Amino acid sequence: MTAQFGTLEFNRALGSDPTRVFTALTSAADRMAWGPPDPNSVVIIEDQPDPAPGVRELSRCGPRDNPYVDVATDWIVMEAPARLIYAETLSAEDDVLGCSLAVFELSPDGEGTALKANVQIVSFVGPEMMGEFEGGWTHALDNLAKHI
C-alpha cells in the first residue's frame, strides 16, 4: 500500500485562558476526558511519565470494550502556554496504521484562547485512515472546547 499524506487545519475559540488550554492539551487526565475520537471510544493513559520534550508516552485508544490501538506520543516542543508540538504513531497488532505531527499555537483572545492547530498526517493503510484522522481530530477538538 502506498502512503497517503494530508494536512488538517483547525481554529477554535476556547472559553478558557491559554494556561488552562495548554494544561488540557498536556494533562493525561484531561486528554482522557476530551481526546476520544468518537463518542463510543476511550483514550487510556496510565502510568506514564509527565509530558516533556524528549519523552515518549504510550497509551491505548479505540472502542470502549476493546481499545486495541496503541499510540506512541513523542513530545517535541512545549512552550507553555503558547506552543505545543508532538508526534503520534498509531498501530494495531504490530502494524503501523498512521502517524501525525500536531502543532498547536495558543494566543489570548479576550478572556479566552484562540487555538490554531496544524496536523500533518500520513496513512499507511489506505484512504479510510485519512478519514479516521480527520473525524477523530474534529471530534476531539470539539470535545476540548466543551471540556474546558
Image (tube, grey):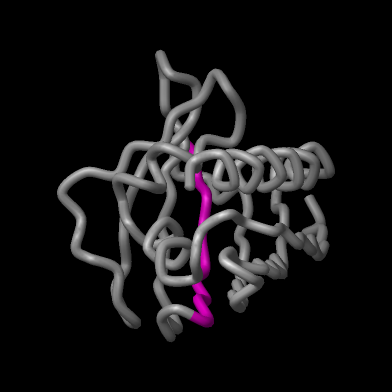
Magenta-span inclusion, residue 86: yes
Q: Residue furthest left?
A: 47
Query: Taking 133 as reference, is 99 left or right?
Result: left
Dominant secondary structure (helix, strand or loop) of the stretch shown in magenta: strand
Q: Nearer the viewer, residue 121 or 17?
A: 17
Q: Measuring 20% from the left and 55% from the top, which residue is drawn there?
A: 48
Q: Measuring 31% from the left and 51% from the top, which residue is drawn there?
A: 28
Q: Position of residue 130 (x, y in %)?
A: 78, 47
Q: Position of residue 79 (x, y in %)?
A: 43, 85
Q: Looking at the picture, does residue 103 appear above or below residue 46?
A: below
Q: Residue furthest front?
A: 110
Q: Looking at the picture, does residue 23 appear above or below residue 65?
A: below
Q: Position of residue 66 (x, y in %)?
A: 41, 19
Q: Measuring 29% from the left and 68% from the top, which residue is drawn there?
A: 51
Magenta-span inclusion, residue 47: no
Query: Taking 16 as reference, is 28 left or right?
Result: left
Q: Nearer the viewer, residue 77 or 133?
A: 77
Specify start and end residues of the magenta stretch as a single range. 82-92
